[in-house]
Image: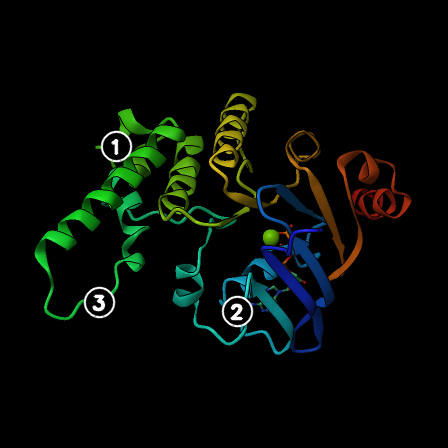
Amino acid sequence: MKKPPLLSLNRVSKTFGGLVAVNDLNLEVSQGYIFGLIGPNGAGKTTVFNLITGVYPCAHGSIRLEDSELTILKPYRIARLGISRTFQTIRLFPNMTTWEHVLIGQNFLSRPRLGGILPLQRAEEFTLREQAQEALKVLGLWEMKERRAVTLPYGSQRKVEIARALAARPKLLLLDEPTAGMNAREKEDVLNALAKIHDFGVTILVIEHDMRVVMGLCDHIFVLNFGQKIAEGTPSEIRKNEEVLEAYLGQEE
Ligand SMILES: Nc1ncnc2c1ncn2[C@@H]1O[C@H](COP(=O)(O)OP(=O)(O)OP(=O)(O)O)[C@@H](O)[C@H]1O
Ligand SMILES: [Mg+2]
């Protein structure tokens, strides 16, 4: 029997004034795979992430993570259910070290405590530190943990953001153009890290413009154009799809 999806979007739409950014979208992401979300500029990809994470309220349709309906939840509740993300543009704090960035990524996980049972809190803190350490090591940032994140090379700054998202031990990791602006070596590095993250059992949904990265990394790809899903399938199916080719060729004109 087919496994129920980890994440499902059912007839999701989002408008900004008169603009339909996401149009009647259905997506199913099953646990344990790497999914790609591609499409021309302005296709609605980032908006889909903002809807899943509760940044934008979703007026139409349903978004579920396993048994939970996300469209009625605040962003921090959605994060606690196990969804982490990175952003299309770098968002780092000027005075914080790499280590501090990764630790604050987990802050929302600690629940407010009444009374406070010290040994338990210590155990929890210990676990969070271990997770932060592991995330930094997976991304190859451990040696740089004491450096201010904004002083790192561009590629490493982007990796800090992935480490921060990973340290929360998400079920689902949403990455918005994780290799944008990177050179070939940095891209290779990130790809290796993503493969390791996947091996930990984290399901990944990644927005990516670099077709080589997408085709090499993803098990299954969704293609958006003007807010609508125009195709989905394996990399080899997508490569052959006429409508997809047209959407991309149209952009180059
Ligand atoms: N907050 C907003 N207010 C108004 N319009 C928005 C807002 N966010 C996105 N849009 C519009 O919605 C459409 C989809 O934008 P979105 O950022 O989701 O595209 P994208 O596929 O991520 O594009 P890119 O590849 O350039 O990042 C665009 O036309 C964009 O201008
Ligand atoms: Mg975008």
Q: Few, some or many C-alpha atoms within 10 Å of disc 1 (few <14, some 14-19, many ≥20)?
A: some
Q: Going from the N terminus, do you reach mark 2 or mark 1 first? A: 2
Question: In the image, is residue 155 above or below residue 110?
Answer: above
Amino acid beneath label 3: Pro
Residue that appears at 50% across and 39% down: 201
Question: In the image, is residue 9 above or below residue 182?
Answer: below
Amino acid beneath label 2: Leu
Which structural element holds mark 1? loop
| x and y, in percent, of residue 175 in the image | 53, 46
One can see residue 100 in this view: no
Q: Few, some or many C-alpha atoms within 10 Å of disc 2 (few <14, some 14-19, many ≥20)?
A: many
Mark identifier at residue 179 = none
State left or right for residue 247 relative to residue 34: right
Q: Depth-wise, is mark 2 or mark 1 nearer the camera?
A: 2
Q: What residue is disc 1 on?
A: 145
| x and y, in percent, of residue 163 in the image | 38, 39
Q: What residue is disc 3 on?
A: 112
One can see residue 235 in this view: yes
Q: Nearer the viewer, residue 176 or 235?
A: 235
Question: In the image, is residue 6 above or below residue 192?
Answer: below
| x and y, in percent, of residue 100 in the image | 24, 44
Q: Nearer the viewer, residue 55 or 68?
A: 68
Q: What residue is disc 2 on?
A: 70
Q: Going from the N terminus, do you reach mark 1 or mark 3 first? A: 3
State left or right for residue 208 relative to residue 192: right
| x and y, in percent, of residue 236 in the image | 81, 33
Screen quadrant of the C terminus: top right
